[in-house]
Amino acid sequence: DGGITQSPKYLFRKEGQNVTLSCEQNLNHDAMYWYRQDPGQGLRLIYYSQIVNDFQKGDIAEGYSVSREKKESFPLTVTSAQKNPTAFYLCASMEKFRGNQPQHFGDGTRLSIL
Amino acid sequence: GESVGLHLPTLSVQEGDNSIINCAYSNSASDYFIWYKQESGKGPQFIIDIRSNMDKRQGQRVTVLLNKTVKHLSLQIAATQPGDSAVYFCAETYRGAGSYQLTFGKGTKLSVIP
């Protein structure tokens, strides 16, 4: 089945630790996105990538980093600089980077602090 | 369970009744709109979309209405079923020069009473 796979489903971070969230898609989509979702809030954009080997900061990029070395993969690292990392993280993809088509989402990773 | 629905407006409907979920969008220049459904512990799922040159679009059991005059979007679900219980949110797209901005609403929690 085509889709977006996020792993792990649950992740715990210790103080001072970097953690990496995985996002893989087999939809052959060019564009990929990372969002953060907090209770009662709309999705906030962390980083996005229009195409392989390219990525841009979103609205809340501080404390996060990404890479896009392969078309199908867009991992997100939550660094120790992110002081409030507890949230639900969603990865999305879109066929082309343009604004007239929907983004498709994975099932998320819930990150908590130990 | 998933806490994304905390502090959101809630709509409770009886099974079999029709549901209407409303969304006020912010940018009068937005030209593409999407409704998503998010079940507990999962990522958002695309339901239906509409472009700004339309005022109504129908899918299977769902209808989206767009009123550009008052910047209002609504999602109508016919014969609501228990499986429709979820958080529903809208998204609007504004396209600028060479890029676009996608903004998500905070959502409405739909509870279906059996």
Image (tube, coloured by chain):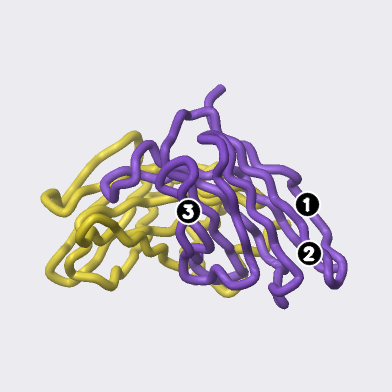
SS at badge 2? strand
In the image, A47 versus A39, the foreground residue is A47
Which colour represents chain A? purple
Image mark 2: chain: A
Binning the other alpha carbons within 10 Å of mark 1 as few (below 14), some (14 to 19) or many (20 upward) gives few
**Dot placed on the residue nearer the N-terminal end, 3 or 2:** 3
Which residue: 51% across, 59% down? Answer: A47
SS at badge 3? loop
Instruction: State the quadrant of the N terminus of chain B.
Output: bottom right
In the image, taking residue B41 as reference, residue A31 lies left or right, namely left
- The spot of residue A26 in percent (x, y) is 54, 28
- The answer, for residue B45, to whether it is visible in the render is no
**Dot placed on the residue nearer the N-terminal end, 1 or 2:** 1
The span from disc 1 to disc 2 (Cα, nearest Å) is: 8 Å
Circle 3: residue type? Phe
- The spot of residue A73 in percent (x, y) is 58, 39
In the image, B37 versus A68, the foreground residue is A68
Circles 3 and 2, Cβ within 8 Å, touching? The answer is: no
| Residue designated by label 2 | A112
In the image, which lettered chain appears yellow?
A: B
Q: Point out the frontmost of discs 3 and 2.
A: 3
Which residue: 54% across, 53% down? Answer: B86
